Image: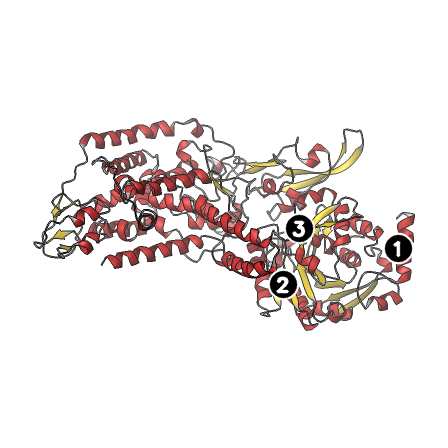
Amino acid sequence: MNRRSFIKTAAIAGAGAVIGPSFIGEALALDGPLVAMAKGVPPGKITRAAVNALGGMAAFVRKGDVVVVKPNIGWDRNPAQAADTNPDVVTEVIRMCLEAGAKKVKVFDRTCNDARRCYENSGIGPAVENIKDPRVELSFVDERRYRMVDIPAGKLIRRWPVYEEVLDADKFINVPVAKHHSAALLTMGMKNVLGVIGSNRAVLHREINDALPDLNRVIKSHLTVIDATRILVANGPQGGRLQDVRQTKTVIASADIVAADTVAATLFGKTPKEVHYLQIAQDADLGVADISKIRLKKVSV
Amino acid sequence: MRVLRRISQIAVFLVFVFLFLNTEYKDNDILPYAVNVFLRMDPLVAGAATLAGRALISLLWPALAVAGATLLFGRFFCGWVCPMGAVLDFADATIFRKLKRRTKLPANLPRLKYFILFFLAVSSLFTLQMVFLFDPISILIRSLTLSIFPGINMAINSLFDALYFTNIHAITRFSEPVFSFLKDHFLAFEQPQFRLAALVGSIFLLIMAAEYFQKRFWCRNLCPLGALLGLLGRFGLTRRRVGDSCISCGKCERDCRMGAIGDDFKSTNRSECIECLDCRSVCPENAVHFIGRDKPELLPMNMGRRGVITSLAVGAVAAPIFLSEGYRKVSDPSLIRPPGALSEDKFLDRCTRCGECMRVCTANGLQPALFEAGLAGLWSPILVPRMGYCEFNCTLCGQVCPTGAIKRLTPHEKRKTKLGLAEFDRSRCIPWKGESNCIVCEEHCPTPEKAIKLREEKITTLSGEVIKIKRPYVDENLCVGCGICENKCPLTGYPGIKCTSRGESRAQGAELLTTDEG
């Protein structure tokens, strides 16, 4: 951390202006962002418990908000293989948004395998359709709808096309699955935003540790809900082998995406120092990657 | 009665279009309809594949049913069922409606289709299967798949894109719902793009354009399926018969789309008549019947001995010439066949280039070959990974192949089937060149234990700096050659990793070794 960013961080912490809505005031009183970590079964229940520990969805979603819920639907894998977000976690988040009075909840991901196969076999497509609420809108990504966004402070990226629905939404709720990734080491919330950007995102993998903080500068997650109901510890991000899956029965939620990722990293036995982009993100004031400064609220179901 | 025939043509064509539109992944790993049924009931395809492949193909039983029905009822298929015939009749009723055809064509032109049939029969017998060039059902599905449907799709997409980008709400509020309805029901999920699309499409257009000379020019003069059905149906029970009330007005003869009626208006060329019943409808005296006590008068069949012998001989000579092509000695490394494809010779014996597998391929990776498999392998399916890869869990191509050239695989078998192997081009691959990490290929590698492995290595860059870099290697025992690595490689131009057919499961001798190295 250089001097300037240290001063900035200190100033921000002091002023209490950490990213995130209303409840932050409460968190700051005890210094550092609040991260909820709910353990237990079933997935839907711990998802709700984690968000409730942050003050409930009403703390994030206001009546009449247009909300984007962005799961990871990247791969043609089934839920047990832990490559995509658990469908029950996704639907629970959507339900909570509806309960909080969201006008519209939009769900999509730019997939790696054939989108139809991913939506179907991840279980997320059928599960979301099953909610049967006119306010819920499951769609495939429409290639025409990317808008160029400048990243003035970008270290690697100067500008990049971002999906319009995300830019136009009132709230962006990031619902990743935590798993192994050989470039990023781990993929969680910060990496999940790669699913809402256009163009040839593969080139970003060369400098992924700079690319992720850059993108998260302009794509702000108002709430991050990390599915760690089961995690993929090897052969990620696609997996396919049940022996690489661990049943961790956990959901992590926070308004601070860096803090949420930092806590999730501990499930893999990694320290945030090993996950370089978390450090870089902290230096860029995107959140807190120092576990000692995070206020962790554990909930058991 | 003519109305009945038209209803039949329209109904069958609608079924045909429905099946075509459903030859696509629709949230179901097993296709719910027998989308390939039109090809499977084609006796020409069945005959050629059986002869050339030297095997009874159980998939093709519907062709036996059609052949049996033809024995009983004559060449009704062409008039009542064939979707190509329906398309041509439709063109006549619309584009060519006002046309007065003046060109006189040689009277023995219709013989040509028999010569084509005999050529195909003999070459098939010598294991050169060329039926793909002339079979109407294959031509139609191939043209629709490779050019017409992608073309329509492109046109509609461009139109709605143009409306969308006007950014005028008054327009998009109407255009977008219509577009999404079309996308849900008719358009392709993603714009299909095929090599050789224009070439394949122009053959179909030529067949259409030939209507300028004659009604059903293709069916009368060229179609070997029509020839085969004509021969089979020669002694069928339903035949054109003309009663005594005939006043020899000649309306039927002038109206006959097949030129099947003799100069006396009473006799019929049985092999040419497709039982469209137009003659029955136009007859002012109701003298024409197809069932009844009147005795049918048949025109003798005259093919000309010389032509028959020549076509047989050409078939016999063509086979060894094509089969001795150099492509067969050394196979092109880019000849990556679909998963479950038979060994190359057997594959070409059966493949009718109908394009069903290319149509159904989820990632648009199967493409028509140009010369990769020799001239006899024209338009046969190959995986072109740079255009599209083979989805690891998808088994659709084997489900739609009408002749079993691509075997139907279970998902488990599919995931074990090697299409080939991937190889790094170390002079292009980013980490191999020492530029930086990349791992995109590794990330996309679909085998549960990744076939692309990363090894952290210390390297000295050109500027003398020592850095650590993750370099990718292919574990050839795990690699299935699906091509997703090549497809997703972020390099423009030549990729840093390339798939070839080396090590494919179907390779000759692959079964001899315990290792997978081919």
Mark 3 packing: few (<14 Cα in 10 Å), some, or many (20+)?
Answer: many
Sequence order check, earlier mark of 3 and 1? 1
- Cα separation, mark 3 vs mark 1, equals 32 Å
Element on which disc 1 rests: helix
Q: Are marks 3 and 1 on the same chain?
A: yes
Question: Closest to the observer: A227 or A267?
Answer: A227
Give a yes or no on whether discs 3 and 2 share a subunit.
Answer: yes
Where is mark 3, residue-wise?
Answer: A237
Residue name at image x 45 percent, y 55 percent: B31
State the image coordinates of residue A225 (x, y, percent, origin top left): 72, 62
Mark 1 closeness class: few <14, some 14–19, many ≥20 residues within 10 Å? many
The structure residue drawn at horizontal position 72% and vertical position 52%, both measured from the top left corner, is A191
The answer to whether B345 appears left or right of B6 in the picture is right
Q: Which residue is mark 1?
A: A9
The circle on residue B294 is none
Residue B512 as seen in the image, left or right of residue A240: left
Q: Earlier in the sequence, mark 3 or mark 2?
A: 2
Looking at the picture, which amino acid does disc 1 mark? Thr
Task: Describe the element under mark 2 as helix, strand or loop.
Answer: helix
Pinpoint the chain carrying mark 3: A
Query: At x 42% / y 50%, what residue is drawn?
Result: B400
Label 3 SS = loop
Packing grade of label 2 (10 A; few <14, some 14-19, many >=20) is many
What is the residue that sits farthest to the left in this orientation? Answer: B244
Mark 3: which amino acid? Answer: Pro
